[in-house]
Each structure stands twice: as structure tokens, then as C-alpha cells.
Image (cartoon, helix red, strand yellow):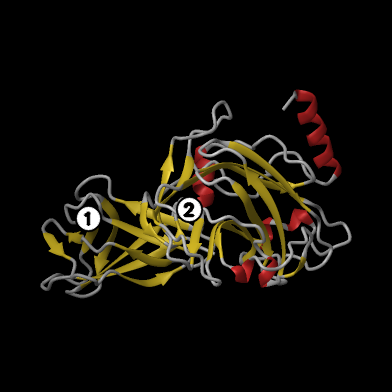
Amino acid sequence: MSKAAELANLIGNINAGGGGVNRNVIINGAMNVAQRGTQTSHSSGYTLDRWNVYTSSAARFTISQESDVPSGEGFANSIKLDVTTADDSVASSDFGVFRTILEGQDLQSFCKGTSNAKPFALQFFIKSTVTGTYAIELVDSDNSRAVTKTYTVDSANTWEKKTITFPADTTGAFTDDNNASLYIQWGLIMGSNYTSGTASGSWESQTTANRFVGQVNAVNSTSNNILFTGIQLEVGQNPTSFEVEPFERTLAKCQRYYNRHQANTAYDVVCHGHFGSDTQWFGTYFFPTEMRAEPTLAGSDTWRIYTGSTVPVTSGSLALTRATTTAMTIECVTGDNNDEGQGAMMTNNNDSDAHIEFKAEL
């Protein structure tokens, strides 16, 4: 795009209420943060931070962060959806998407549901084995409204940039809170339940048959893969240049939803605490950034409590006792013969693959 065209697009967005800094409401659109690492045999749930793959079909994926990126565009990473179990017989109820979910309080600049509503300008890069028509929808979950547009992958296994403008919607405001308000969903596989209607290209009450009209089956072979990067959604009628932000800022945004303490070495220290009884240890873990909501605790249980001598953690006993958006108290049931009030620290039990996850996802 020429400088003159970029300037014209920026002016167009400013006229539509967009432009300026902090214009990209997408988090981790450059696919730089991947706290979970590679996911195998994946069918549902979060993968790279803030990105979710969901399918009700038989298709399964290996999801990974890759260095395969469009040349000369300033990106270092992409997300790769590698089909490991194909679905070449599409049932009417099959549904599969790549998606992200946004909070209502981050979407107020679109003025949705008012007379001053703004359009949604989306851009992204895609590289897919399967050419043809793909559908993408925005879903306003606060008001059960949706809009679908289509785009075309023209060349197989080639990076292509797509720009799509979704119209403003004067009906139904996004709720101003920290709950899920907007789903952005790229179609992967869709049965006739979702393709047999008519895609209007305008906001409407969500109608199942209209959601992914024209969508190809992108998961019909284990030779297939799909990569994305450079995803940006902003207020306005024309996408502007991708907004680059420092890695640490993107990481902090991601850690608001998901924080993973991954062991780097054997006996890595997690946190400090004390024994509340001879078999119960309590420690407080402070999150690096305030989380969206009180999180849940998950992860491996190969841990120990160290008092100067090793006290093993009973298998499966890692538990949450209290949590806020800034810290969590972890309880471990251990072996006997410890002293109430005795200080000790929690470390992994000589296991560099051990991790703890704190989740406050949408």
C-alpha cells in the first residue's frame, strides 16, 4: 500500500471515530505470546494466548507457534493449525472455528447500540492449504446478534492479507464489564445447519443457518494446515497499519487471563509459605498482573515442600483455598511430622516440566 493510500485510510478511520494509538482491540494478534506451548490432539480450548480453537467435528489439530510469517510485514510469529485427524465427511451439525473473545469494556469505542455506532475494520494474514471461500462472523453475545462476511483464499500455502469491514450496528450495546461480549470466529468446517441460509452481511438476530454460508471444508485431509498472524480489529471503515506494541505489554495483557508458572530448572521455587499443621502447607502466589477475575488453579502436581529437608507433596493434593484477582493461596497436603508455623518453600520435585496454571479466561 502506498503512503498516500495509508494516509487516506487513516483519515477515513479518524472520520469514523478510529485511528490513533491503542486502536487494536485484539490481544496477541501477532501471535508473540504462547505460554501453553504446543497443543496436540486439540479439539477445544485455548492455544496461543487469547486464541481458541473449537470444533464439534472429528477434526483434531496440533496447534503451535511458528516462525513462518509473511515476508517484509514486520511479524516474527504465527499460529499454525495442523490437521492431525481429518474430517472429510461433513455432518449437518459439524462446527469448527478459530476464534478470540473480547470483553465488553474494551469495545465501548465502537458505540454499538447507539445512533453514533462505528464500523468494525478487521485485517489479518492467512496461509492455508485449502483455497476457496471462507466465512468469518462477529457475534455480539450480549444481544444475540451477529454479522457474517466471506473472503477468499486464492493461492494454496501462500500468505495473503485480508481486510474486511463489518458495518456499524445501532441496535444492542456491548455491556460495559469484564465478561465476554464479542466473539470473532473464522470458519474451518461447517455442516449444513450453519450454511443453508443467507448471509446478509449486516447485523441481525443470530440465525444458525446464516452463520457460515459458503464455508469450505479446510480440515478434510491431514495434509492441511492453516496459519494466521497480524490480526487487528479497530474502529473505522478502513484497516490501518498493524499496531506494534512491546512484547512485555502484550504478555501483561495475556497474563490478565492466563498465567503459567513453568519450571525452568529442577527444584525451581514457586512461592514461600508455612505449615498450618503437621501435614498442611499454605503459600501465597502473587500474580505478575491483576487477573480479569478470580482464577482457577490447574497444572501438574510434581511438587515438594522444602524446609531444609524434602517433604513430598501427596499426589493430587495441590489445591486452591483463597483467591483474589491479585494473589492466590495454595494448599498442599504433605507427609507427616512437620511443625505448625514452620516456614518452607514450594519447589518442583526435580521436574523441569512441572507447571502451575492460573486461569481467568472468558
Tag 2 and tag 1, C-beta contact below 8 Å: no
Foreground of the two, 62 or 122: 62
Instruction: Give the residue type at disc 2.
Output: Gln
Indicate whether 254 appears above or below 55: above
Give the quadrant of the N terminus: top right
- Label 2, secondary structure: give it: helix
x%, y% of residue 166?
Answer: 75, 53
Residue at label 1? Answer: 348
Q: Nearer the viewer, residue 323 or 101?
A: 101
Tag 1 or tag 2, which sits nearer the N-term?
Answer: 2
Query: Picture quarter containing residue 307?
Result: bottom left
- Residue behind mark 2: 255
| Image coords of residue 340 (percent x, y) | 20, 72
Q: Quadrant of the C terminus?
A: bottom right
Residue at horizontal 79 percent and vertical 60 percent from the top: 202
Residue 151 in the figure: left or right of residue 53: right
